[in-house]
Amino acid sequence: MPGKTLYFLLFALYAAAVAGYAVHAVRRHSWLNRAALALVSGGVLLHTGLLVQRWLLAGYLPVTNLFATLFFFSWALALTFLYFELRYRLGATGLFVMLLNLLLLGSALPRDTKVPALIPVLDTPLFELHIIFSFTGYAMFAMAFALGVLYLVQARLATAALPELSLLRRLNEEAIFLGFGLFTLCMVAGGIWAHIAWGYWFSWNIKSVWSFLVWLFYAGMCHAKFVRRWHGGVYAWLSITGFGVVLFTYLGIGLLLESNHPLE
Amino acid sequence: MTDDRTLLQRLWNLGCSLKLAIYVASLATLLIMGGSLVMPAHPEIFGGMDAAPIGEWFAGAWARAPQLLWWLPLTALCLVIFGLNTLCCLVDWLIHLKARWRKAGEYLIHSGFLLLLVGYLWGNLAGFRSGPHRLAAGETLQLPTTQYALRLERFAPDFSAEGRPLDLVNEVALLHAGQEVARGTVRFNHPLLHDGLVILATSLDQRLTGFRCFLPGIGMVDLAPGSRVALPDGHTLGVLNLLADARQTGDGRVIPVGERLGNPAMQLLLLRPDGSSWQGWYFLREAPPLPLATTGAAPQPLQPLAGYVSLLTVNRDPGAGLALAGGGCLTVGVLFAMLSFYRKRARGDRPQV
């Protein structure tokens, strides 16, 4: 396994992109936006390469410790941002989203990058499916969180640097819709795996319970978009709250409580 | 009649109400959030939630700590109302299918959720969870409330270089009324599935199989049930039984207390050269019985000998099939909904860029 040089290079690429978006927010030169997007794209390519390299070296998708899950989550969030940026040209929203991504990657980098051997309890394709859908879903929820925050900022500032409120809201809805879909697939894969591993498809361990809460919350969000009175700030606040539930499920339980869920 | 129809219509509208869904789901969310944070603080109450069907667990736990559990029946009520609401929405959609067929993906997700709810209820009402059961190779276990029995034919745990168990390989055969109906290798992530039964490798343990002893005139010898040792003076010592943890009752019987090594006792048979015999129990932590001591045939226990036993869990969930169907509906529904979303986008119904 190579040293951390490439990981720090990846961090530098994303940090440079954040700087680019920050300057673009002030100076509004389109080349800054394009440069920042190129840096993000380069970062995603490097990120994907590192992930694939780790996967090939390990023989399995390496997401069995906190470094690995943070690294994967960061990759998924960068990819999610790239999707929204290329489809909708969000411009300065990249500042906040990539800053979030930088936090994820930054909290991963101090940790050991070594890939541990796969233990037999995790040796099943259902584990990889469960993880992939879980973190791509989380990435969409993180994107929705960012869009919710930006909605509230735009509602206060009404700046030309950010997209219109209606666009921010509709993108928020899209992120939540896609995130809910991906997280549903995560729950299905997890339920099948739980039945095979434990003999029951729903467990009352705290991680499983809070994963169900995340699913229920975002199921509610998918319905909340039809309530006209909630189209504005309420929906944005719900997006922000939802990500709090996600963070507690992903990090809070592992750091603060005990669970028999694998990887805790 | 008009009043009845109006009342029914209002009830139906309430049943299909989006706001009802949001309020009930929100309430369930808050109840579960709060309750789930109580759970880790009381492992003595909540630790066994997965070891039994939820109703069975709840009945026992409620008797002990109702103040910690009131949120559970309320949550169940919310989820039942949510389920009924989902069912009404689904039926309403089916009634208006011609106009709303494009929402098929979303309503497959609704169907999937309903199937999961019903599957969970059915599985917990009609199923069971048992174990972990300690089985050594060659032993057979009668499964609860069924005519099934499980025979463990071979048990081979796989250890890492540091001695950690990596995998547990169990060759098992499932019998029904004495006839073999299924067999397979049970290990992590590879249960044996048959007729709603799920047989899983859970863990391993050690079981006392014998004792290494010193016999005067013989030297080191491993004694286990079935062992026979010919002593130099013409006596023969045989081991009839071995208990890892035993005690003597008031009427002199020796009974097992547990499976873990505690106060071990060996049932011995001493055959004398003159044809007489003595049979009795020797508690290995105490002085040998007089007949053994006087003949010099008392084995001096040096170390216990242990073999591995498998710990197997056997569950039955009649609702698992429904739940799997629900998972299938959810999966297909998600894919349809996403396809429909992108199709709408491609047709021009997309955010202004």
Image: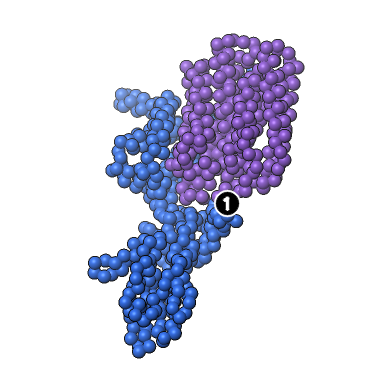
Chain colours: A purple, B blue
- A58, above or below A35, in the image: below
Q: Is residue B255 shown to the viewer in this render?
A: yes
Q: Is residue B99 shown to the viewer in this render?
A: no
- B298, above or below B14, in the image: below
Q: Give amino acid for label 1.
A: Pro
User: Pointer 1 indicates a residue of which chain?
Assistant: A
Query: Camera-side residue: A34 or A102?
Result: A102
**Left or right, B127 with reference to A176:** left
Helix, strand, or loop for circle 1?
helix
- Residue beneath disc 1: A120
**Left or right, A24 with reference to A184:** right
How crowded pointer 1 is (Cα within 10 Å; few <14, some 14-19, many 20+) is rated as some
Query: Camera-side residue: A114 or B299?
Result: B299
**Left or right, A118 with reference to B318:** right
Residue at screen point 71% across, 38% down: A3
- A143, above or below A211, in the image: above
Task: Farthest residue to the left: give it.
Answer: B251
Task: Farthest residue to the bottom: give it.
Answer: B274
Query: Camera-side residue: B44 or B135?
Result: B44
> Where is residue A145 drawn, in percent x and y?
56, 24
Query: Camera-side residue: B225 or B302?
Result: B302
> Where is residue B204 drawn, in percent x and y?
48, 57
Q: From the image, which quarter does the N terminus of chain A lie in?
A: top right
> Where is residue B138 drawn, in percent x and y?
47, 68
> Where is residue B296 drawn, in percent x and y?
38, 80
Q: How many marks?
A: 1
Residue at screen point 60% across, 34% down: A70
Residue at screen point 55% across, 20% down: A148
Residue at screen point 31% across, 27% down: B4
